[in-house]
Image (cartoon, grey):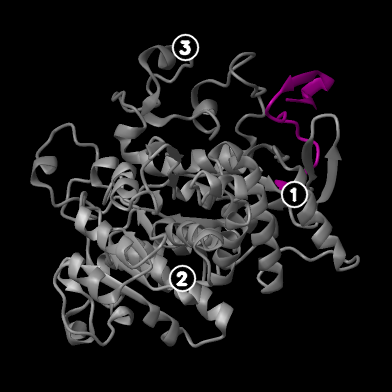
Amino acid sequence: SFLAQGRGGKKVRGVMESTRKEGMSNGCFANGGVTDVYGEDRATEDQLVTPWTFSVATGYTLIRNPRYNKGLAFSEKERDAHYLRGLLPPAVVSQDLQGMGIPVGKLSLYTALGGINPAACLPITIDVGTNNEQLLKDEFYIGLRQKRATGQEYAELLDEFMTAVKQNYGEKILVQFEDFANHNAFELLAKYSKSHLVFNDDIQGTASVVLAGLLASLKVVGGTLADHKFLFLGAGEAGTGIAELIALEISKQTKAPLGETRKRIWLVDSKGLIVTSRKETLQHFKKPWAHEHEPIKTLLDAVKSIKPTVLIGTSGVGKTFTKEVVEAMASFNEKPLILALSNPTSQSECVAEEAYTWSQGRAIFASGSPFDPVEYNGKVFVPGQANNAYIFPGFGLGLIISGAIRVHDDMLLAASEALAAQVTQEHFDKGLIYPPFRNIRKISANIAAKVAAKVYDLGEAGYPSASTSGSCEARRALHVQSRLSMLSLSWRRAACTIPSIDAIFKLEESSGALRLGVRGKRLVI
């Protein structure tokens, strides 16, 4: 909490700033921002907005406040208590039933794990209709009642949305794509990564966290990334995204062309091993992974032929890493690395106990679903979880504090390396290739510092660098890495003020927290 000067000189303690008018002139904030054309920032001037435990904004004022508005999820009792009758549709449903479970959940993790103020986060679901006849005939269906938009109509809608977002919020707004179909996901990312600050967690976030696990595991299995051979089961967004980032990291380490490093990576889809003879019928995002080899139909045959050191599952099909597959991996690898990344548990390619038992306790295992520790021959193995939440909160925070205007692969590599560096020998001794999730705020801070530094290295920062010595940035990054357990951001009401990399860093020794003095940059996510 903090102490704010309210209207009429009254001091109010709370977690929101007062709605005072000081610092505003002609609808603009003195510390930055844009003109308040529609009077939105003055919507609460007549009533002080403080946490509900003290006094509560009501009616239209409450609905206009992003901190409190729950859409249709206000209960009947809340609607009566806060004078919302007549301002909302009569339906009372949860936010999840409104179709916002994923965007709301992801943004909640940005706040909980990355320290980003929720008032700066806007969940959006783009409704393009449905081809589900049952839903179209359901009188209680709250979505758009029409067939799904496709082709040019779909592209024009997305382009209108992305253009409007940039026009309203500027270059530094971060747009995260989530749960788009494969063909749309790759096309949208390729198109807008050149003109917007965009990030696809299904493709890039998954790839970054898996690469981190691979980099960490090298300390156990030995060698460099280029010394290993990779076989994927699954060639969708996740599989091809991970494969590409691995190839990029090998290229970075060896200076070899990307086309050459891709040859260390093989993919199996529903029709078998992806090989050159199938190239004409492959989707465009699979074609870079078509290598010279005889056609192979089954995963087991692919394992026996390719002899990979790393087996990665992104198929979404459970029980596909069979006993024969795991035993084959263990037959030519002293420490086979097996990543069963599909979730939930029922769709995991294999469970932790199977991986350890079938490999006689030699496998290094991680999964997309959580599994309990496994005891085998008197030793307890703790399976790691390759959870995207390790990466995207810190990655997003790094983009924000640097004022990044574009996302580059080098930033994702920096995030992976930062996560891998936080795995200690103690973790390896337990079979872990990821740090414990209980340290996630510190992990996110480390990742944010590394990503922000890379943004500056690439010249993609939207905020000016320090005018002092070059070592200043390193000291600031070190402060973030070593001291940031809770990020305290200063916000001026709905203006969503955020810290720049040139913010004044002030350590509060009493609390052990790092407070960022803000220079008044404005950003909305």
Looking at the image, is mark 3 or mark 1 nearer the viewer? 1
| Residue that label 2 marks | 246
The answer to whether 99 is drawn above or below residue 240 in the figure is above
Q: Is residue 294 left or right of residue 500?
A: left
- Front-most of 91 and 413? 413
Q: Residue at x 15, y 54 (%)?
A: 147
Residue density around tag 2, few if under 14, some if 14–19, many if 20 or more, within 10 Å: many
Label 1 crowd bin: few (<14), some (14–19), many (20+), radius 10 Å: many
Q: Secondary structure at mark 2?
A: helix
Residue at horizontal 37 percent and vertical 65 percent from the top: 333
Residue lying at the far front in this picture: please name it.
377
- Dot 3 falls on a residue whose secondary structure is helix
Cα gap from disc 1 to disc 2, whole angstroms = 28 Å
Q: Is residue 103 magenta?
A: no
The residue that appears at 59% across and 51% down in the rendered structure is 423
| Camera sees residue 25 | no
Look at label 3 and name its amino acid: Ala
Which tag is nearer the camera, tag 1 or tag 2? 2
User: Please, what secondary structure does the residue beneath circle 1 have?
Assistant: helix
Asked if the residues shown at circle 2 and circle 3 are in contact, with their CB atoms under 8 angstroms apart, the answer is no
Do the residues bearing badges 3 and 1 touch, measured as CB atoms within 8 Å? no
Residue 480 got which mark? 1
Residue 260 location, quadrant:
bottom left
Q: Which residues are magenta?
A: 1-29
Q: x and y percent of residue 83 in the render?
A: 46, 16
Which badge, 1 or 2, comes first in the chain's sequence?
2
Q: Nearer the viewer, residue 46 or 479?
A: 479
